[in-house]
Image (cartoon, coloured by chain):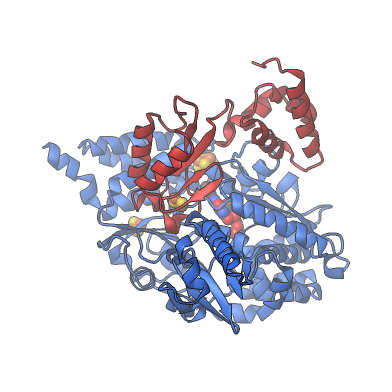
Chain colours: A blue, B red
Amino acid sequence: MRIYVPRDSAAKALGADDVARAIAEEAARRGQTIEIVRNGTRGMIWLEPLVEVEDGGIRRGFGAVEPGDAAGILDGSSAKALGPVEDLDWMKRQTRLTFARCGVIDPLSLADYGAHGGLTGLRRALAMSGQQIVDEVKTSGLRGRGGAGFPTGIKWQTVHDAAAPQKYIVCNADEGDSGTFADRMIMEGDPFTLIEGMAIAGIGTGATKGYVYIRSEYPDAIEVMQQAVRIAREAGLLGADVLGSGRAFDMEIRVGAGAYVCGEETSLLNSLEGKRGIVRAKPPLPALEGLFGRPTVVNNVLSLATVPVIFEKGAAHYAGFGLGRSRGTMPIQIAGNVKHGGLFETAFGMPLGELISDIAGGTASGRPVKAVQVGGPLGAYMPVSKFDTPFGYEEFDGQGGLIGHAGVVVFDDTADMLKMARFAMEFCAVESCGKCTPCRIGAVRGVETIDRIGRGDASALPILTDLCETMKDGSLCALGGFTPFPVMSALTHFPDDFACQKEAAE
Amino acid sequence: MPQPQSEPISDRISVLISEKLGLEGPLLPILHAIQEEFGHVPQGALPLIADALNISKAEVHGVVSFYHDYREVPAGRHVVKICRAEACQAVGGAALAEATLAKLGVEWHGTTKNGAVTVEPVYCLGLCACAPAAMVDGKVVGRVDAAKMTKLLEEAGA
Ligand SMILES: Cc1cc2nc3c(=O)[nH]c(=O)nc-3n(C[C@H](O)[C@H](O)[C@H](O)COP(=O)(O)O)c2cc1C
Ligand code: SF4
Ligand code: FES
Ligand code: FES
């Protein structure tokens, strides 16, 4: 009997290690032979630890499991039975392309990986020219999943065309946005996908060296990625002769040091070089003068991890999903005050309200939704009146929001939006790299100004608005430049939260 | 000010440095290795690193002070990181953090009097769908409530 118990850190945070131990002990006590596979998560975090028992090729789920459920799972009598996992509504309604294998396979088994379509894309790419590889990515319509949504193929073209003795592929695994965990999930649950994507990027652009910069807050992901790279190297997937093609590509895992701004690509490059993570002015573009001054592709984990399926199934297949200029699928991460939180990969276009009310089942507290922050700490707070906005880059932009890395954080009606606006400013002050005055000083002033408003000083309201304008116009990067979005959206859509203190004082 | 290092410690630091010297951009990996072994980056390490990398001591200090992770003094025996970010706030994270700090009688970054626990803020642990989240010495904990926190702190000897 084969039993799956996730090793994903969300599952571990909810007791998966204890559950795995309890199942092993119970089986030993009964003299029953079982094989425990520590898979990634399926993404249904409210059901974690989600244990699966494979029987006749069908995987039946049990969740959320506690150690005391071990006996019931082994003899099939557990009241936590969910039936076949693939038949669950949450799974059936998704289009899993990037995350097809996550939660299904043993993350560190290359044999499992290959049996589920892994390396098909790289093998196809190895038979193509660099230009053909870049063209395939362009045709797929893939846009950067790190936040800015820049077309990946165009970035690769610039690096492909640049002549240099050394080029680099840098994977941005700094995933600092609150409400996001897709990078972590795929690194822990299907690390070879990222490695394969980076290898294709390297072969396509002529880069022979890659780095994955993982935030230090992700110790489990770091461990899995380090092991995966070692396994890939031993198997000849990385190294001087990638899969016997005669082409070279190798990579290293690097660990961040707790700075949100190091997710900004030029700050990240400085950090990799061993410098302070100060943002660099552009131009020059990293694609031309990036790591150590060499042409460098900087891509988010999800952008790179989506490349293998594009090459496996063809660019047209991928581009066939989506809405407008947002092609393919997006792994949406639903978090905060929701009944069913987790990762839901779907074609672009699903309205925000459907994601929250239908997919996530509304709030965990059962209270009405008040606001939804989409796209991390630099994203706007959307009121319920904007729930018909379809999930797409241009569609959110048109509503004064952004999809960013596709984190959706739900707040119920107990949320105090003045506090959330204050937090946005405070976060900017704590994490500013210090290069621009409007960001470094402005954010500190922003906290003070919001505190004045909180004390009932209405004259501080126009000061806050002006300050936000100054930050928008005078900041080099989106930390200072976009912090006004959560602040101003909170103020605009929830004015009552900025006025009640005043009324109380009067 | 550089503290005079006892010979074995500076020897050990030199070994840690030399192990990473072959890397491209070795400074962060060196600092991580030193902090992992000593729990902080001792002042005495700075001139050794500066020497090995052929950069100024001020430059090394600039890097150490830029990143939230690097400590210039040792932490308590256990480090409890509590997520302060938005998704955790949406399910009571701020109240949990405040209550924890009050209970321990410390501010953020503070260490309990008995030296058992240092409390650090963290901005997202990627556990936003099982918030509020915390991490104790690198071990993740989800859906932390007052009872779970009390247990964690007891285990850490706070
Ligand atoms: C303050 C700030 C933080 C960022 N954090 C991240 C991050 O954690 N991960 C990421 O992939 N991109 C982040 N970005 C975006 C990167 O600068 C860059 O656009 C991205 O890595 C490019 O990859 P992509 O085209 O695949 O999205 C951040 C940008 C800013 C301004
Ligand atoms: S906006 Fe802030 S974080 Fe961005 S470059 Fe300027 S000071 Fe640095
Ligand atoms: S959602 Fe941004 S101002 Fe309305
Ligand atoms: S916001 Fe707390 S874990 Fe992500």
- Which of A353/A440 is in front? A353
Q: In which quarter of the image is residue A25?
A: bottom right
Vertical arrangement, residue A303 with respect to residue A127, above or below: above
Residue A368, image x and y in percent?
25, 62
- Which of A41/B70 is in front? A41
Residue A223, image x and y in percent?
66, 52
Given the current orientation, which residue lies at the most extreme front position?
A30
The N terminus of chain A: image quadrant: bottom right
Q: Can residue A396 be seen in this view?
A: yes
* B144 left or right of A41 in image: left
- Which of A161/A175 is in front? A175
Vertical arrangement, residue A501 with respect to residue A329, above or below: above
Q: Is residue A476 visible?
A: no
* A258 left or right of A109 in image: left
Name which residue lies at 76% across and 22% down.
B8
Q: Quadrant of ligand 3?
A: bottom left
Residue B80, image x and y in percent?
48, 39
Name which residue lies at 60% across and 53% down.
A220
Given the current orientation, which residue lies at the most extreme bottom position?
A56
Residue A86, image x and y in percent?
51, 79
The C terminus of chain A: image quadrant: top left
Name which residue lies at 83% across and 59% down.
A239
* B127 left or right of B147 in image: right
